[in-house]
Image (tube, rainbow, N blue to C red):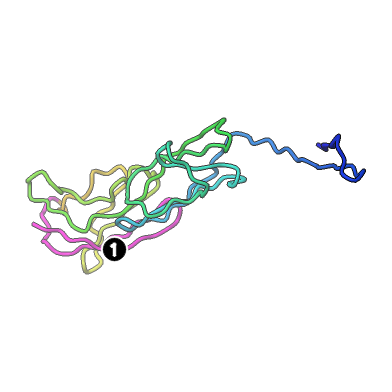
Amino acid sequence: MIVTSNTTIASCPAQVEIIVRPVGPPEIISIDTFDWTEDNNGFTVNINNPEMYEYSIDNILFQESNTFTGLPTGIYTVYVRDRQQCSTVDARVALLYYPKYFTPNGDGYNETWRIEYSWFEIGMMTYIYDRYGKLITSLAPNSPGWDGTLNGHRLPATDYWFVVNRQDGRIYRGHFSLLR
């Protein structure tokens, strides 16, 4: 579009070219998480033309950046809207971490060990090993967790190791304590 002024300065006509770019509704392509800490996690929302949209995790306060940082583990809903506030989309994202210990002693608290919010990540698998590298059990994402037993026998209070294979190919290793 070209706009021409009716007034001239020193008999010079002025023209300005204005380019109009329509903004469609946002479409989230993917969300990259960076988690596995207790309270310094985050994620980046991948979207075409990210500079044309704004982002929020509470649907109240929006920001220009498509990256959120300094978050504790948990389930978040991210909202993306165009800057004219005509359309909004949302998606859920999980930031994961693991418990450092569990206490399967029958008191009803910390009876099993599992990756919190693992149910959110369908393809994730967790493998638990003893200190000699023997596989004790494997946990699917929707598993209720490990109860500290092997073949119905209580295992000793000590440290156990785990490997987590995330659905996006990332692998995490760590250890935790079984306390009785």
The residue to which callout 1 is attached is 174
Residue 116, image x, y percentages: 28, 48
- Asked if 132 appears above or below 163 in the picture, the reply is below
Region rendered in magenta: 152-180
Picture quarter with the C terminus: bottom left
Residue lying at the far right of the rendered structure: 11
The residue lying at 45 percent from left, 38 percent from top is 91
* Residue at the outermost bottom position: 132
Q: Is residue 158 left or right of residue 127?
A: left
Identity of the residue furthest to the top in this view: 86
Which residue is pictured at 31% across the width and 54% down the height?
A: 97
**Position of residue 172 measured from the top left corner of the image (x, y, whole percent):** 36, 60
Residue 122 belongs to magenta span: no
Residue type beneath disc 1 = Gly
Q: Quadrant of residue 23?
A: top right
Quarter of the N terminus within the rendering: top right
* Residue displayed at 33% across by 43% down: 119
- Residue 13: x and y in percent read 89, 42
| Element carrying mark 1 | strand
Residue 82 position within the rendered picture, expressed as x and y whole percent measured from the top left: 57, 37
Residue placed most toward the observer, 122 or 43: 43
